[in-house]
Amino acid sequence: MFRFIIFYFVSLVFLFSCSNKYDVFRSQYAFKSSDGKPDYSNLNYWAAHPWKHDPSDSIPKPLLEEERDTSVDVFFIHPTTYTKRRKRTPKQMNADIDDSYLNAKTDYSTILYQASVFNAQCRVFAPRYRQAHLSAFFIKDKEKSGQAIGLAYSDVKTAFEYYLKNWNHGRPIIIAGHSQGSLLAERILKKYFENKTLQNQLVVAYIPGWPVPKEYFSSLKMCSDSLQTGCICSWRTLEKNYIPPYLKNEGGDSYVTNPLNWRTDSAYAPRSMNPGSILFKFNKLVKHTTDAQININKGVLWVRHPKFPWSFLYFTKNYHPGDINLFYMSIRENILQRIFSFQGLVHK
């Protein structure tokens, strides 16, 4: 199952692990776990949480005048940031929960640039978890791989149960993630939402960067427009006409959402429909960066090469690192649309 994701994670490495720039933040993460496990009653083990200030609270400068109303919760599962192993533990397949550098890297990359998309309308909950190492997704030893991903899921599951018991109190929920986080989000949706009472609280799920197999869910459906609720949105972004070798035999066995028009058919969405991207420069909003069109037969989202030559996506045809960032404003606006729809209100 994992062969088609390898190149995506390699691209993610390029975005999130090219330097030691996160060292400056390490002093913020001096906490140590007594047993090597996360304690979700302790806010240190949440990368984002409404009871503390964290990078998910950051708002790009062009958006500072937005109205904010955190009437909904988002449970966000961050993608893989564990891409390098310590020399003393070369075969360690799961991250240490109290790794100060890795926690800083997670917070000031994925939490800042991805989880922040929800902060205008949601309380953001993002657990730290013993994420599987990058290599877990393409090693030949499937048992070892499964154990690593299983441990990551066990932490996320524990965090979600703690959140439900202590902080949800019947509030509407958005489930979100990216890449490894989206894989784990699928399992959360399957266990806690599909055909369960909690499904009535689900506003929407945004789980890009990982395929949604067509046979995986039964009652949970893909969103067919921008207002539908209780449904799933997912996409994997590639340059137009590019299909990596590992995807050629996939057969299009995954659902895809177009994050510009929020449809699941092949209707073309031009660049003029893209209200803005947030990339390396968090405080710079770049409008009309790229278009989007679903290739239904391949189960991917195609976009023309982004127009900005300085982007981290310039030298690749695989835009997995930009699954959220390319469509930052479109997602941000759609969150509000779906919340209003869920609440039975009209968004003007």
Image (spheres, rainbow, N blue to C red):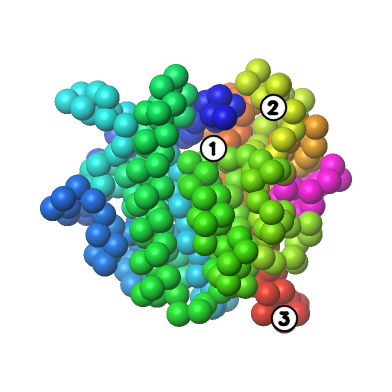
For the residue pair 203 and 284, the one nearer the viewer reads as 203
Quarter of the rendering occupied by the C terminus: bottom right
Out of 236 and 326, give the one closest to the viewer.
Answer: 236
Residue 250 marker:
2
Q: Residue at x 41, y 62 (%)?
A: 160
Question: Horizontal and vertical percent for residue 41?
Answer: 26, 67
Q: Residue at x 42, y 70 (%)?
A: 164
Query: Is 217 placed left or right of 180 in the picture?
Result: right
Circles 1, 2 touching at the beta carbon (< 8 Å): no
Q: What's the residue type where badge 1 is placed?
A: Pro
Q: Quadrant of residue 2?
A: top right
What is the CA distance from the residue labelled 3 to the residue labelled 2? 39 Å
1 or 3: tag closer to the N-terminus: 1
State the image coordinates of residue 275 (x, y, percent, origin top left): 70, 55
Q: Residue at x 74, y 65 (%)?
A: 228
- Residue 274 in the image: state x and y as whole percent: 72, 51
Which amino acid lies under the numbered mark 2 shown in the image of this protein?
Answer: Glu
Q: Say which element carries label 3.
A: loop
Residue at mark 1: 321
